[in-house]
Image (spheres, grey):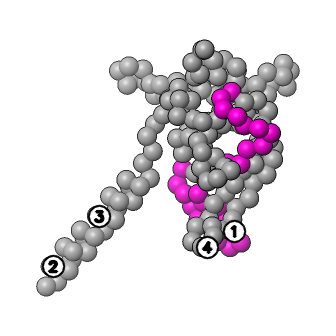
Amino acid sequence: MKKTIVISLVCALVGFAVTAAVATQVIQRTPQELAQESALIVDGTVTGVRSYWNADHSKIFTEATVSVGSTYKGNGGGTVRVVQPGGVVGNVRMTAHGALSWNRGEQVLLFLEPSVPGAFQVAGFSQGKYEVERDPRTGRTFVQQTLPADLEGTAPARAQRVTVEQFINQVLPQE
């Protein structure tokens, strides 16, 4: 009897661990794949961040408001709302592993997919958000582009700083 209970408990724990591991897996996307999957690609400035409960008070979401500077794909308008699971409301924190952090004033390049009505979500969960840096001397804007590991897999992936314009030209097909 005790052996059956122990075996059942171990099986339940292993099943839970496998389910949790599967639930948090994200498929790695190239920037080109993100661009193809995205309905909207914009750069802009985060102007607001707020977390809130859903209608039935069972989940917390975070919404970032982005003032659009340039639209590279789709129709971004002047402002875009980006919603993701997780956040803090009062003393309650709901964590979505791999979720992005947002900061007011942050410059971003976003690959977006439709989400709830009137809002978008970042493509590839967190992969479609790039922080934009402006060179104070030249005024040019840059992103960090992650380069894949070499073909034999002996060298790890590395990052290369490229202008936003170069990056967009690399990931969007030329028409």
Looking at the picture, how far across and down is residue 171, in whole percent?
Answer: 58, 22
The mark that comes first in sequence, 3 or 1, is 3
Label pair 1/4, CB-CB below 8 angstroms = no
- Give the Cα distance between marks 2 and 3: 16 Å
Mark 4, residue position: 57
Callout 4: 10 Å neighbours few (<14), some, many (20+)?
few
Label 2 secondary element: helix
The mark that comes first in sequence, 2 or 3, is 2
- Identity of the amino acid at label 1? Val
Quadrant of res 72: top right
Q: Residues in magenta?
A: 72-98
Mark 2, residue position: 4
Label 1 secondary element: strand
- Give the Cα distance between marks 1 and 4: 11 Å
- Give the Cα distance between marks 3 and 4: 28 Å
- Give the Cα distance between marks 3 and 1: 31 Å
